[in-house]
Each structure stands twice: as structure tokens, then as C-alpha cells.
Amino acid sequence: MGADTKLLRNRIKSVDSTLHLTKAMGLVASSKIRRATGAMLRGREYSDSVTNIVRSLVSNQDCKNSPYMHNRGAGTTKLIVIAGDRGLAGGYNANVFRTVRDYNQDVEIIPIGKRSCDRFGSEHRSAEAFTHEDSIELANKLCAEFASGSYDRLGILWTRYISVMTQIPEVTWLLPLQANEDNVDSSGMIFEPDELTILNAAVPEYIAGKLTAAVRESFACEVAARRMAMDSAGKNAQQMIDSLTLQYNRARQGAITQEITEIVAGSGQ
């Protein structure tokens, strides 16, 4: 019986240590949520602005000559995959990597986020520390390669923030640019020197804006997912401590009762 109480006491201490860890990580995640969601909203606003400019240009007939609108058909694809910097974020990273499997093997992965870099073998690009300057540098490189014909399609696999409890991974295709019925009518706009020149100059900034927004939103999703995961883990740990404490008290009470019984039996002899 003594061995049982000692084992239960050690398990309670172990789970209690886990509970303190989950609470600490939950507090850190909570402190980051406001900053992360603020950056996400600013990124969305900027992305929408540059998207509207590009959409107003691609509907122009002269812009059909842009190298960024050349649809070369099936060919080499580059996919920017944004995952988290750390684990313990529920299914956040797993959902991203599960989505990657939906694409064929000849896709070239450009990882952002330490987990993504570990998964696909690349130097670490931290999602939390990824700046707009980093986006511009990567966008310029990717646009130059696309214009030269090095690859045929560019997309971003990121995670859309729905709420603190819900985040959904999805893929957005950026290149080649597509003209469709939803594009903004540019008939009332004046572009200098001409629409084609402006479009070719705007595309790298457009790619950078979309990339910055995707990274910021994905990071907000990671923080929110980690907070929910730590809240859930904390509740489970507390329930386990309560259950183990009840078992410990019963075992201790049984040991005391047995000792009293043995003393009474011994005194009667």
C-alpha cells in the first residue's frame, strides 16, 4: 500500500509540472494574440489594396502581353508552405502538412516557419520574425524566375483565421495572373506611363503583399491554435490531478485503516 501511495504522489507531481507548463505557454500565447491579430488585419488591408490595383490592370487588353499573365499550361509549380515555428499548437502544423500531400510530387516547396523548414529541408525562416522586407526579397526573386520561364505556377499554402477556435489551411494561386469577370474595371483610371509598365512594376509588390498577409495570418492562427491546445491540455491535466488525488487519498486512508486494524488486533492478543 505504501508503494501505491508513493507512485500516486509521484504521478501527481509529474502531472502538476505539466499543468504549470501548459498554463505558462497558454499565457504566452494569450499575450501574443492581440499583437498577432492586429498585424493580421493590417496585412489583410494592404493585401486587398494591392490586389485591387492588379485586378484593375489585368482586365486591360495591353496587359495580356505581360510575362506574368503567360499561362504555360501544366509544368513546374512552386508552392510556398507556411507552417508554425513551434509545436504544441493542436492540429495546426499537421493540417498544413496534410494539405501539402494533395499536390503531386514535382511541386517545389518553399518553406516558411521552422516546422516547415525542418519538414522540407531548408534553412530556417521564422514565421514570427518574417518581415515585409523578407517578403519583398523573396517576391522579387520569384517574379524574376517566373518571367524568365524557370517555372510555370506559384502558390501559397497558408492558414485562414476564422476564429480563435477555427483555422482552415488553403492554397492561393498567385502566378500566372488571371483575368476574370470579377476584375475591377479600370476604364476610369489613368496609368502613367501605361498599364503594362505599371502592371509589371506592381506584380512583385503584389506578391510581397499577399505573402506578408499570408504569413501574418498564419502566425495568428498558430498562436490561437496553441492557446486553445494549452487550455485543453490544462483542463485535462487538472482533471487527471483531481482523479489521482482521489485515488491517493483513498489509498492513504486504506493504509491508515489497515494500520489501525493491525494495532487493535495486536493489542487483543
Image (spheres, helix red, strand yellow):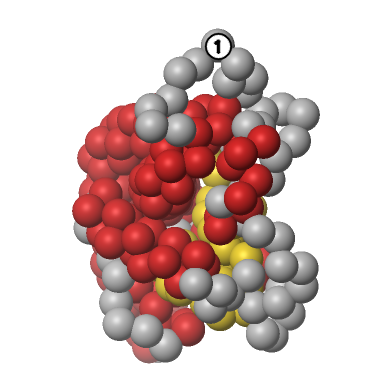
Location of residue 165 with respect to 255 vertically, above or below:
above
What amino acid is at disc 1? Gly
Quadrant of the rendered image containing residue 193: top left
Binning the other alpha carbons within 10 Å of mark 1 as few (below 14), some (14 to 19) or many (20 upward) gives: few
Relative placement, left or right, of 222 versus 21 is right
Q: Nearer the viewer, residue 111 or 59?
A: 59
Relative placement, left or right, of 108 versus 251 is right
Relative placement, left or right, of 61 versus 257 is right
Location of residue 115 with respect to 140 vertically, above or below:
below
What's the residue at 32%, 56% (across, down)? 135
Q: Position of residue 217 (x, y in %)?
A: 43, 44
What's the residue at 37%, 84% (across, down)? 122
Q: Residue furthest top?
A: 188
Q: Nearer the viewer, residue 47 or 118?
A: 47
Q: Nearer the viewer, residue 178 or 12?
A: 178
What's the residue at 44%, 62% (across, down)? 143
Disc tally is 1
Q: Position of residue 221 (x, y in %)?
A: 46, 47
Whether residue 164 is visible to the viewer of this picture, yes or no, is no
Q: Position of residue 95 (x, y in %)?
A: 61, 63
Q: Position of residue 164 (x, y in %)?
A: 49, 37
According to the image, label 1 marks what residue?
A: 188
